[in-house]
Amino acid sequence: MDAGAFGQFLRYATVGLISNVALYLAYLGLTALGLNYKIAMTLVYVVGVLSTFIVNRVWSFNHRGMVHAALVRYVIAYVLGYLLNLALLWFAVGRLHLPHQGVQAAAIVVVAACLFLMHRYWVFAPINVRSHSS
């Protein structure tokens, strides 16, 4: 990983760590109150997407491109991440009967890694990099 990518990853990880700890605690609180684990994950996921766009765009990736286009790509990336998260919960909890708390904690890491790659190479990529990959 080059120095630029490493710096982006550290900033992205910082944003992700802070937001995911807060969101995971919210997830645990919602499920402890009796909310279904899939609905709880959906609610905290939406809050996470909306709350991290600006910080990731400005600080993590120093993106200078069009805000609207980046937001559309960001939402698409997070929809894909959501579907991956939901599939992991469905399979590991619904089929393998593993505890949802541990599965969701592991899913956060897997989805975050996939999202970093999408953010770096597609969502917030410099315009010249994006135009070559389109």
Image: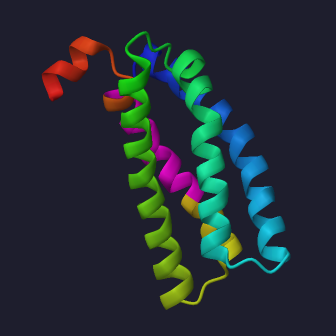
Is 88 within the magenta?
Answer: no
Q: Nearer the viewer, residue 96 or 77?
A: 77
Residue 104 lies, in percent from the top left, at: 62, 66
Compared to 29, does 81 lie above or below? above
User: With 19 as the anchor, is 120 left or right in this view?
Assistant: left
Is 111 within the magenta?
Answer: yes
The quadrant in which residue 1 appears is top left
**Residue name at image x 77 percent, y 74 percent:** 31
**Residue name at image x 74 percent, y 63 percent:** 27
Residue 64 lies, in percent from the top left, at: 43, 9
Q: Looking at the image, how many numbered discs can be counted on the residues?
A: 0
Of the 4 image quadrants, the one containing the C terminus is: top left
Compared to 7, does 82 lie above or below? below
Residue 107 lies, in percent from the top left, at: 55, 61
**Magenta stretch, residue numbers:** 108-121
Figure coloring: rainbow
Residue 61 lies, in percent from the top left, at: 49, 19
Magenta residues, dominant SS class: helix
Compared to 82, does 34 lie above or below? below
Compared to 51, does 58 lie above or below? above
User: With 103 as the anchor, is 17 left or right in this view?
Assistant: right
**Residue name at image x 52 percent, y 28 percent:** 9
